[in-house]
Amino acid sequence: MKLRSIELAMPGAADAAAFMTDIWGMAPADVVGNIHYLRGSGSFPYLVALEESADSYVRSTTFVCTADRLEQLKRAVSAAGLTAAPATSDDLGGGHGIIVELAEGELLRFLVDAAEVAPIEGHDLPVKLTHVVFNSADAEATGHLVQDALGFRVSDRTKGMVFVRCNDSHHSTAFARAGFASLNHIAFEMEDLDAVMRGIGRLRDQDMAPAWGPGRHGPGANVFAYFIAPFGPVIEFSTAVNKVPDDYQAGAPEDWTWPEKRIDQWGMSDKDFGGLRAAEEKFRHRRDWEAAPLDA
Ligand SMILES: [Fe+2]
């Protein structure tokens, strides 16, 4: 199972796509109708789809998996009684599978037979998405739900987050203890620490300072820099998160504490709590499909 892409809708999708390619550092993949597809250097046909719409919202977050894993998912999702439907992807790469709505409206799509593409060169291109994080009213409940219904594993719990993995990367998603449901942020995996730093430089050239970072997180140990995108959401330059063994023991909030005044390993940057919180409220989940039986 791998995190592949996120599909967003918003006004001004063309301008957003221009920012993501010209400044953030993605490569254009294609424009199909009113949807702009943006890719990284890796083998996924796109990482971000930006669809023109009157409102800003998350259409889906897409994972790719094996046919066996999809069959397990169908059974577990049906048993959990979640709202779900078979899904055939009209997005780049195609593929088919299911789309699932979690308890707080998060929309996760799982595809098989989705095409991949040849990697491309570009030392400032993101490689792929490393994680997509959601805000939750009850992050603990959602952590249990994705373990039971999706076979994901909780990697760590902190005061602020429940980190969840779907492969050996420490987390591909996480649920923030925010008190409301929305997109928290989208993290782009850069080739290395230098590529993260060059990204910060590109944004500084546009008079955009990080809302938080550079720094190095505790759980996952990734280097990060968060920005508030001009089109609304919080986006992150990140190095890869740590790999963890199958028998990794999930940490508890008391295992992940910081010295006073410290909220990352380096302690070199301020965090714009208010700006980040406002940006996190911009993209809610919106389901535009009806539940249908999964042919498990
Ligand atoms: Fe992150």
Image (cartoon, grey):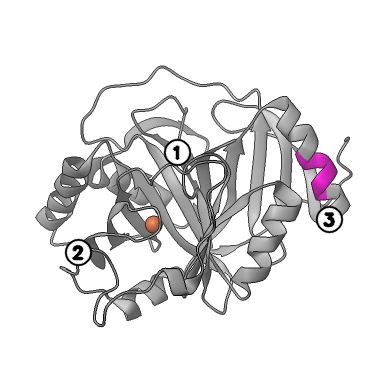
Magenta part of the protein: which range?
73-77
Q: Amino acid at mark 3?
A: Ala
| Main SS, magenta residues | helix
Q: Which residue is mark 2?
A: 266
Discs 3, 2 touching: Cβ within 8 Å: no
Which numbered dot is residue 80? 3
Given contact means CB atoms under 8 Å apart, are the residues at marks 1 and 3 in contact?
Answer: no
Q: Position of residue 196 (x, y in %)?
A: 22, 47
| Residue sitting farthest toward the top | 118
Total marks shown come to 3
Asked if one can make out residue 281 in the rendered structure from this viewpoint, the answer is no
Given the image, on which type of amino acid does mark 2 rest?
Trp
In this rendering, the label closer to the viewer, 1 or 3: 3
Secondary element under disc 1, as helix, strand or loop, is: loop
Question: In the image, what residue type sits under mark 1?
Answer: Leu
Residue 149 part of the magenta-drawn span? no
Residue located at (87% from left, 51% from top): 79
Image quadrant of ligand 1 equals bottom left
The part of the image, by quadrant, that contains residue 277 is: bottom left
In the image, is the residue at mark 2 within 8 Å of ligand 1 by its beta carbon? no
Q: Where does the image place residue 10, in percent across and percent down from the top left? A: 48, 56
Question: Which quadrant of the rendered structure holds the N terminus?
Answer: top right
For marks 1 and 3, the one nearer the N-term is: 1
Residue tagged 1: 47
In the rendered image, residue 134, in percent from the top left (x then y), is placed at 53, 62
